[in-house]
Amino acid sequence: MPSAPELADRPSPRGTWLLAAAVVAMGAAAYANALRAGFVYDDFPSIVRNPAVRDPASFLPGGPGYERRPNRAVGYMSFALDHRLHGLDPAWFHATNVAVHLASALLVFALVLLAFRTPRLRESRLAPLAPAVAFAAAALFVAHPVETQAVTYVVQRLTSLATLFYLAAVVLYLRARLGGVRPSSIAWYLGAILSALLATKTKEIAFTLPAALLACEALLLDGAVWHRALPVAPFVALAGIIPSSLVRLGKPAGEVLADAASATAVQTATSRLDYLATQLVVVPRYLGLLVLPIGQNADPDVAVAASFLEPRVLAGGLVLAALAAAAAVLARRGGRGWDPAALLAALGILWFFLAASVESSVIPIVDVMNEQRVYLPSAGLFLAAAAGLALLASRFTPRRAGAAAIAAAALVAIALGIATHVRNEVWRDQLSLWADAAAKSPRKPRPLNNLGAALSEAGRADEAAQAFLAAIRASPEHAEAYYNLGRLRMTARQDPAEAIRLFQTALALRPDYVDAYANLAGAYVQAGLPEAAVRVVEAAGPSVRDSAEAQFNLGVACALLGDLARAGEQVEVLWRLGSPLAVQLEAFVRSGAARSARGG
C-alpha cells in the first residue's frame, strides 16, 4: 500500500466544505418531490386526529401527551410545533422530515472526519483522505431509497429524529474525548449528554447509544479500560430512562416483571423466541435492500418463523454470522498489518448490529418487518462501505484515491437518489401507497383492506368492494375488512341488510370493535329498526361512551321512537364530546318535536 504522502489528492478545507454541501444538495434533490406528499396511514391517528398535537405544551413532563408516550414526547412535540407554525399543511411536516434527514447525513460526515482524528485511525494511510471517506458514507446515507420510509412517512420522524440525536451524541462525545481536559471539551460532553437525553425521549431505539459509545472507545480510542468506560457511565444512566418509563415501580416484584413483559411486547402475542427466529430472516432482507433496493414495500408479508431449524432461518443466521465474523476479523487485523481504517469498517458493522437489536431481537412487535427500522443501523453499514471503498481506491489508484472514491460514491449516490425520487412517488397519497403494497403483498389482508379504504374515499366503490373481498379471502378473520365493506354497502348501495350482516361478523371476530357497534346501530336505523339500534348501543355499554357516531345513532333511534327526552340527552352528550354531530342531531330532534306538536 502507498504511504500517506503518495495520496496526493487530499481535499483542502474548502474542498471539505464543498463535499458536505454536495451531500446536502444530493439529499435535497432526491427528496424534492416528498414535499408534495400528503399524510398517510398512521399519520392520521398520530398527527391529524390527535388533539394533543395542537398544543406543544402537552408533551412537556406532566402534560397528557407526555404521560401517554413519555419515551416519544420529543418527537411528538416536533409534530406539535409544526402544527403550531403551519397548521396541518403536510408540505411543512415533510419539509421538517427532510431537514432532519439532511442534518443526520451531515452528522455521518462529521463522524467520519472525527474518526480519522482518533488515536487508532490518525496513522491510517487514508487519514489525509478523511473528507473523501466522509463524503462517500454521507452520500450513500442521504440518497439511499431504503431510507424513504423513515423520511417521507411523516410519523416516522420518530425514527429519523431519534437517529439525528443519536448521531449528534456520538459526534459530540468524540469531539469532547479528542479535546482533552478543556472547558470546550466539557461543553462538547454536556452537549452529548443533552443529545442523548433528547434521543431517549424521541424513540426507544436510543437504548443502544451507550453500547455504540463503548464500541467507539474500544475501536478508536486508547487508554485504560476504566478511563474509557467512565465517560460512558452517564449515558448508561440516561438509557435506563427508557425501560423505567415503561413500568411503574413500587409494586411487588412479580407485578413489575409482568408489566415489563407486557411493555416489551408490542401489540402481538408472538413469542420472543419465534420473533427472534423471524428476525434472522428479516435482518438479511434489510441487508439485501441496502445492497440492491428492489421490491421495497410499506407492508411486507413475512411469515413468523416457528423454529430456528427452518431453512430460511438457518440461511439468514449464516449470513449474519458471516457479517459478524467479518467485523471481528476487521477489528483484529486493523492496525496489525492492515490499514487501521479497517477499524472503521468494523465499527460500522458493529453499529449495524447494535442499532438493529432493539427492534430485531427478542422484543416482539406486531409488524415483524418495517423499512424504517434499518435507518439508524444503515448509518453504520455506510461507514463500513465508505471505508472499504477508500481502501480499494488507495490500493488500485494510490495517487488519485480520494478523487476515485469521491467519483465512485457520487455515481452510486446519484443512481440511488433517482431511485429515492421514484420511491417517494409511492408515498404521495393513500391510494398510491396501498396500491403498491397490495400488489407486492397480495396475500396479506391489511394492504388490501387499506387499498379498499383509499378507493372508497376516492369514490371508486366497485373497486373498493373488490379490494375488501380480496382482504377477506386472504384472511377470513380480518374484522376490519368486514367492517369497511359494511360501511361501503351502507353508503354506496344503500343496502343496510347486508351491512348489518357484515358488521355482525366484524363484531363476532372483534367483540371490542367500537366503530362496528356504532355503524351497526346506524345500519339498523337505516333499515327502519330503531329498537334494534338502541339495543346495540346499550349492549356495547361503556365501550361506546366516547364514540360520537354511536351516541349520534342512539339519539336518532330514540327520536324515531318518539323518546325525544332521551334523544335530547344524546345531544348534550355530543356537545360534551365536542362533536359536530351535535348540531345535526339537535336539528333532527327539533324536527321530531315539531312533527309531534303537529300530531305526526
Image: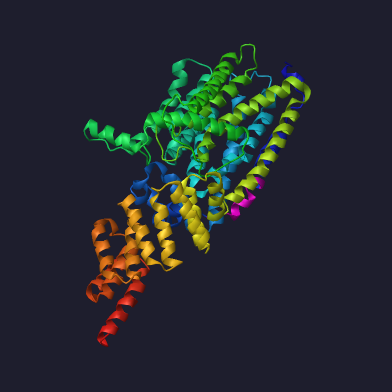
- Percent across and percent down for residue 9 are 76, 27
The answer to whether 388 appears left or right of 542 in the picture is right
Check residue 36 for magenta coloring: yes
Q: Quadrant of the C terminus?
A: bottom left
Label total for image: 0
Residue most extreme to the bottom? 598
> Which region of the structure is painted magenta?
29-38
Residue 176 visible somewhere in the drawing: no
Q: Is residue 506 left or right of residue 427?
A: left
Residue nearer the viewer, 248 or 456:
456
Residue 482 counted in the magenta span: no
Q: Residue at x 33, y 62 (%)?
A: 520
Of 247 and 217, the residue lying toward us:
247
Up the image or down, 118 lies above or below 146; here it is: above
Q: Is residue 362 above or below residue 466?
A: above
Predominant secondary structure in magenta? helix
Residue under the point 39% across and 57% down: 483
